[in-house]
Amino acid sequence: MKFIKIDTEVSPKWAELHTNLMNNVPELMEGKNCKNSIKILQEMIDVVQGSGSDEEWSNYFYSNDYESLTSLLPLFSKSMNVEVGNDLGMLFALLSQIVNDLWYYLLPDHEYVIETTIEFCLHLIELPKSEVRVGGKKKEGEENGKKDGEEEEDDYGYDTEDEEKENDEPEEDEGMDGVSIWLLVLNHIFGGFAALEKLPSQVEEDEMVSFANALLEIIAKERSRRFSTAITTLLTLNYLHALLLETTENPILQAILDRKENSSEFLEGFFVEMNEYSYPAHDQPEASHAQQMALDLLYTPESAGFFFPNDLNVMIDILLTNIGALSRQDVAILPYLECIYLLLINSEWAFHERYRRVEIAKMLEDIISHSCDVLEDVCYKAEQIMAECVDVLE
């Protein structure tokens, strides 16, 4: 796609569409003139998708037209979402994705941005998928995205157990549904909080747990792009809770542990994240989120029981690969050593084949024997592991 510069014909077009939409707000509040507003919103989406780069849009909004972006947010009330939630949701998701840098400015500066976004996300997960959809074509006999005689869907938009009988034929592209929109918005807002290392007071713990449970539903049933987005978002939620909420218990981690029957699905996505953000991508924010999850899962014998023996072997492979690749002077090596330590003392690893035991011991001995070339904290951690785990490493 050839991008058009924002400062020529695009910004007047955006401004015109924004003015038209704002003029419709009084009627929208009464449930009137929705079709025209949806048409305007779709044109706004087309403008953003078809012009400018991420950086150009960020600069444009922040420097020239900040209010046109923030003025869209009060539209995210429950009454408005019932009428035009699909297109508003898509626009919101799209804008938060494209103007990512600006999103970080919006979060701390405007409390209502957080309030309306959380309300919007909570509202969306309560709606069946068929009620919120963008793009695609309705098939004959469909009403509000649902076929005549179609089985009911559960709270997160998945068909009931009869769906397997109906999925023999390839599905037509039905555009972007409510689950996908919700995932995009949730991923960006909590990604913004993580980048700022700030969790605003408006975000309550029980809301985060509601989001975590909804994400776990997706992880248990999906193997699409939504699966990986759900994993990334769940790791971000856990990271924020561990980093910023001063509580002795972590209900997000507990929600994961309570779904032991779906551990293979979750760990599949988790290991993908651990691998993707291994060296040399170890300094990306997502790496810290994956490391925090590993530390939390291994922190007690009870939580470490979430891993089956083969899962522990995969974890050992990932940890040793990163420790071997990183400089012994790099503080980034410490979380991986801490994971080794917790795995050795809390998991069932020592009661099975003790996978790669010799290599673990050799790695620790090498760090200790070259202490003059090693970061002090790294050497201390290696010495601690050898002292406390000597029995299982012999």
Image (cartoon, rainbow, N blue to C red):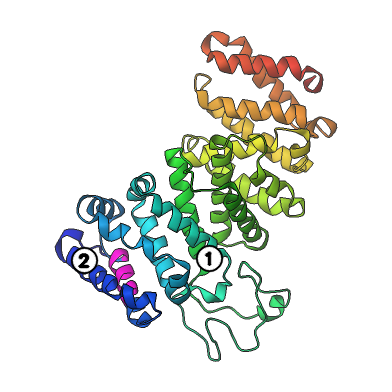
Q: Is residue 106 magenta?
A: no
Please name whichever residue, 379 or 155, is drawn nearer the observer in this view of the structure: 155
- Does residue 15 lie above or below 185 as drawn? below
Q: Amino acid at mark 2?
A: Ala
Check disc 1: other Cα within 10 Å, few if <14, some if 14-19, many if 20+: many
What is the total number of numbered labels drawn onto the structure image?
Answer: 2
Q: Is residue 345 left or right of residue 237?
A: right
x and y, in percent, of residue 4 in the image: 21, 63
Q: Is residue 41 magenta?
A: yes
x and y, in percent, of residue 39 in the image: 33, 78
Q: Secondary structure at mark 1?
A: helix
Q: Secondary structure at mark 2?
A: helix
The residue stretch that appears in magenta: 40-49
x and y, in percent, of residue 364 in the image: 66, 19
- Does residue 236 lie above or below 170 as drawn? above
Quarter in which the N terminus is drawn: bottom left
Q: Is residue 141 left or right of residue 104?
A: right
- Does residue 91 lie above or below 294 as drawn? below
**Numbered circle sitting on residue 283:** none
| Distance in Å between CA atoms under marks 1 and 2 | 28 Å
Quarter in which the C terminus is drawn: top right
Check disc 2: other Cα within 10 Å, few if <14, some if 14-19, many if 20+: some
Residue at 63%, 30% in the rendered image: 320
Please name whichever residue, 244 or 77, is drawn nearer the observer in this view of the structure: 77
**Disc 1 target residue:** 124
Q: Do the residues bearing badges 1 and 2 touch, measured as CB atoms within 8 Å? A: no
Q: Is residue 261 left or right of residue 31?
A: right
x and y, in percent, of residue 55 in the image: 28, 50
Please name whichever residue, 221 or 374, is drawn nearer the observer in this view of the structure: 221
Q: Amino acid at mark 1?
A: Leu
**Disc 2 target residue:** 15
